[in-house]
Structure formats: structure tokens, C-alpha cells
Image (cartoon, rainbow, N blue to C red):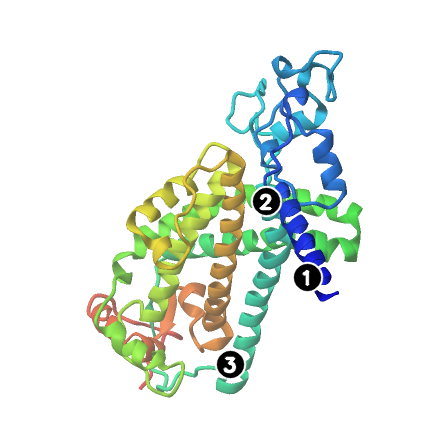
Amino acid sequence: MSALKVLIQAIFFVLLASVATAQEATPQPDRSATGGAQTLEDILARQRGEQIDDSFRRNLTGDPNNAAGLANQLGTLGGASDPDLWRALRYDSANITASNKGQAATVLIQDGGMKWLEFRNGPLKTWGAYLLGGTILFLLLFYLIRGRIKIDYESTGYTVERFKNFERFGHWLLAISFIVLGITGLITLFGRKVIIPLLGKDAFAPIAEASKWVHNNVAWAFIAGLIMIFVMWVWHNLPHRTDIKWLAQAGGIVGKAHPPARKFNAGQKFIFWSCILLGGSISASGIALLFPFELYMFAPTFEKLNAIGLPQLVGLGELPTVLAPHEEMQLATAWHAIVSFVLMAIIIAHIYIGSVGMEGAYDAMGTGHVKEEWARQHHSLWVDEVKPAHDPKPEDGTPAE
């Protein structure tokens, strides 16, 4: 009995091995009768849940020349079908003609759009809200702990001209336009999730339309303000050795020390270069969105980054250098929003310091003149530079004794 049992097991294993070998050696179905399209065997295998290689479908577009004879056709007459057409549209291999001669006119389906939409409605909104909300919460806690930074020196009754009228104009042009752009941009991004549930679609529609129009047109004021402050203040915002000491003492914001500074301290220089670099990037991507499919920035940028090896250094591998027109626009919208969130968080901190966070700071841009004691406390080196050339003006017309 044991010998018989061994013989039966041996036969079973031989048959099993034969079946496995036959399955491995099974050739791909003959698709000549369908012009290269899927066959009945492909369909049945997929219905049985078997793993099949359907890579042949990606580059498949119907070709009437491949059609089988009418008597032998399993597929469509003429060798082309609606699935073939949609597959060709999806993989951008269809021969499309359009009255609009732009590069994007013949791209009717683009898979990357779903990834962009998921990012926009998911991580972008979530982390953007966390960043702005976290910044406001941090500043509130900081104010409760640190309080307002007071002027330590006794009043002299004199003021010093901090900014001229045209400097203040450039600052407020940039500041007000950025606030308007930030609000309208947030309405556009969060309107569907936040405003529509509160007000309804009918009420949100004119708000969205007005926000879009305002955003597109106020953008030019922002760019003008950006150019103005760069021309006026770039030389004052170059790095200086005094910035090291200012940073070491945290500018007097933490603690009681007030390190010497020139016209702009290290913190203000950080704000300035954040506006120039991040604001410039926002402006460039915004212009690309204002004139869609005209300005392509990302493919050339990726090519330069790959050349210097930066993406590879941080583990991203080589970035794609061939992008569809729609991919360029999707990257532009994502970058535009990401950088805007970062700059909004920085500007919120700047607004805090220039208003409730520091006594006397608002006067610099409010009236253009600051108290002499404030200037000496926060910008002592600058006061020493300007006092010989500009006599201080008393606040009430009578200098203090």
C-alpha cells in the first residue's frame, strides 16, 4: 500500500508540474483577428480574475487597415471603436485637429489633472490652513507671554523721519494689494468647502466671480509695489556684520537687550528678501496663469535643477523635463498657492510686530516719523547716520528739557 501511495503521489506531482509548465509556456493570444485589440480570451481571463498583461492597450489605436475580413471579425467594423478612441485621447496619441492652434488645444484628456485636483482639495488646503492658523495661534501665545515690546528710553519730544512719502506709498501699495490678493485667493481656494455650506451656491457665485476679477487685476499693483520696494531698499537690505549680533540677541524680541542696527535690522531684511524672492516667484507663476499656455517655467527649471544635481541630492531623482501644457499650468497653480501660503504666514508675523507687538513701530509707516527714543532703541546706528543731516522735529513743537 505504501508503494502504491508513493506511486500515486509521484504521478500527481508530475501532472501538476506539467500543468504549471504548460501555463508558463502559454503564448499571448493571437490578436490579428481583432486588429491588435483585446480578444475574447483576454475578456474571459479578466472576468475570471486572472492577472493579464494589458500593456498592449496603451499604444493601441484603431487602424482600419488592421481590420479582419467581415466574415471573421470579432471586433468592430473598420478596426476602430469608441474605447480605442478614448484610449488614444487619454494617452495623447490620437490625431487631433483644432481651430485653436495652441499647444494645449489638442490635449483633450490628461491623467495628471486628477492628481492635481486631489492635491488641491487635500494636502494643499489642509496644510495651508494649518500653517496660517498655527502662525496666528503662535503669535497670540507669544503676545500673552512676552507682551508688547515697550520703549525703554525716556521721551525726548523729538521725532526722526523714518520713511519718505514715496517710500511709504510703495510699502502700502505692496501691503494692501497683497492683503487683497490673499483674501481673494483664499476665497477661491476654500469657497467650495467653507463659503458654499454657509451661504449657498447662489450667494457664492457673485463672490467668486468678483474675487477672480479683483485677484487678476490687483496682481499688477502687487508687482508694481514689489519693484518699487526693491529699487528703494535693496542697498539697505544687503547683509552686514551687525546682523550677526542682532540675530544672536534675537533682536530684543526675546529678552531685554536691544542690539544696534542700521536702517533695517536682520529681521526686517528677512521680511524684505522674503517679499522679493517669494513675491517674485508668486508673480511669475501668477503671470503664467493670467496668460495660460504662453509661459512655461517648470520644464526649463527642472532641466537646470537636474543639471546641477539638486533633486538627486535630496532623493527626488531626476525631475521630468518634458511636460504637457496642462501639467505646466497645474504645477503653476500648485506652486502659486504653496508659496503664497508661506509668504502670508511671514507677513502675518510682520503685521503683528508692526502693530500690537512693538510700541511705536506703526509710526514708521503710519506717519513716516518715529520717536527718537524708539529709533535709538531699535536702530541706533541708523540714527547716528541721519541725525547730522536731518534735524529732529519735536512732537509738540517744544523740545524736552
Please name the amino acid that badge 2 sits on.
Val
Q: Please identify the quadrant where the C terminus is shown.
A: bottom left
Q: Distance between the residues labelled 1 and 2?
A: 86 Å
Residue 34 to residue 388: above or below: above
Q: What residue type is labelled 1?
A: Val
Rendered location of residue 178, percent (x, y): 50, 54
CA gap, disc 2 and disc 3: 34 Å
Label pair 2/3, CB-CB below 8 angstroms: no
Question: Secondary structure beneath disc 3?
Answer: helix
Q: Name the residue under label 1.
A: 6
> Dividing the picture into quarters, in which one does residue 202 lie?
top right
Q: Which mark is residue 142?
A: 3
Three-letter amino acid code of the residue under disc 3: Phe
Which residue shows up at 59% across the image and 69% down it?
133
Residue 78 as seen in the image, left or right of residue 155: right
Cα distance between the residues tagged 3 and 1: 82 Å
Vertical placement of residue 374 versus 64, above or below: below
Lower position in the chain sequence, tag 1 or tag 2: 1
Q: Residue 88 lies in what quarter of the image?
A: top right
In this view, the mark in front (2 or 3): 3
Left or right, 196 with reference to 58: right
Based on the displayed image, in which of its 4 quarters is residue 179 positioned? bottom right
Q: In this view, does 3 lie to the left or right of 290?
A: right
- At mark 2, the secondary structure is helix
Q: Which percent across, then down, holds residue 147? A: 50, 84
Query: Which residue matches tag 2?
Result: 214
User: Residue 53 location, x and y as percent?
Assistant: 61, 39
The one nearer the camera, 26 or 202, is 26
Q: Nearer the viewer, residue 52 or 171?
A: 52
